[in-house]
Image: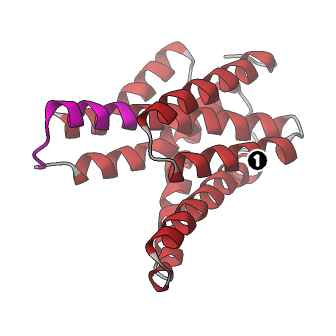
Amino acid sequence: MASLFKLLISPVLLIIGRKKLDVRMYPFLVGAGVYFVISILRALIRSGFSAYDAGTAFFLQGLTSSVLEETGRVIAFVYILKDYRRNSDAIGHGIGHGMLENMGAGFASFGLQMSAENAFLGCAGQFMGSLTHIGLSVFAWYGVKNGKIKVMLPIALVIHLASNIIVSDAFDVIKTLIVCGTAYFLYRKDVDDLR
């Protein structure tokens, strides 16, 4: 059941987004495609971390993911999605970006025996991760659209790195609330073609 939930998070968010916000498919597909490319690059880079001690390798893995994913979002909005500037396009991109991660987590947990508590925490964590991906895509979209990427990118990098290296359920909740609250403010603040 937990595996199925993780697999369904992004499709359900996409359906809701398309019905409520007129989310377009192209930004969603770009988000998924860029994440796929990032995953390949990340795997190649991480293969060189085995020479380091566990703590250093863990930090470098988190840093690598943060830099690649947040830079990937910016590149997507600057070059690939330059004609997609609707507020809802940021939502679509974020859903697509998180989809492959959700699928990986869903397939990885198939057949695993876990307590109800651990299953719930795993599903909650994956859902919060999806919301964070959407929020960080809004950060990138807002920064690119309004010429504030020099402010928004460092903020996104710090948030993403903290998410990767701080293992705490309480931190995940606080981080998700802050990211989503800020993203909602930016989404509503930029009222041009608000959808």
Q: Residues within 10 Å of mark 1 (few under 14, many from 20)?
A: many
Nearer to me, 179 or 31: 179
Q: In the image, residue 41 lies at what x, y percent?
A: 53, 71
* Left or right of residue 128, residue 64 in this image: right
Q: Is residue 123 magenta?
A: yes
The quadrant of the image that shows the N terminus is top left
Q: In the image, residue 122 lies at what x, y percent?
A: 30, 38
Answer with the quarter of the image where residue 72 lies: bottom right
Q: How many marks?
A: 1
Determine which residue is flagged by label 1.
153
Q: Label 1 is placed on what type of residue?
A: Leu
The quadrant of the image that shows the C terminus is top right
**Looking at the image, can residue 191 be seen?**
no
Residue sitting at x 57%, y 17%: 21
Residue sitting at x 50%, y 72%: 57
Q: In the image, residue 187 lies at what x, y percent?
A: 71, 22
Residue sitting at x 86%, y 47%: 150
Nearer to me, 183 or 19: 183
**Looking at the image, can residue 65 be seen?**
yes
Question: What span is in magenta?
Answer: 112-126
> Which is the main secondary structure of the residues drawn in magenta?
helix
Q: Is residue 173 magenta?
A: no
Residue sitting at x 42%, y 35%: 169
Nearer to me, 162 or 100: 162
Answer with the quarter of the image where residue 143 lies: top right
Q: In the image, residue 189 lies at what x, y percent?
A: 79, 17
| Mark 1 element type | helix
Q: Residue furthest bottom?
A: 51
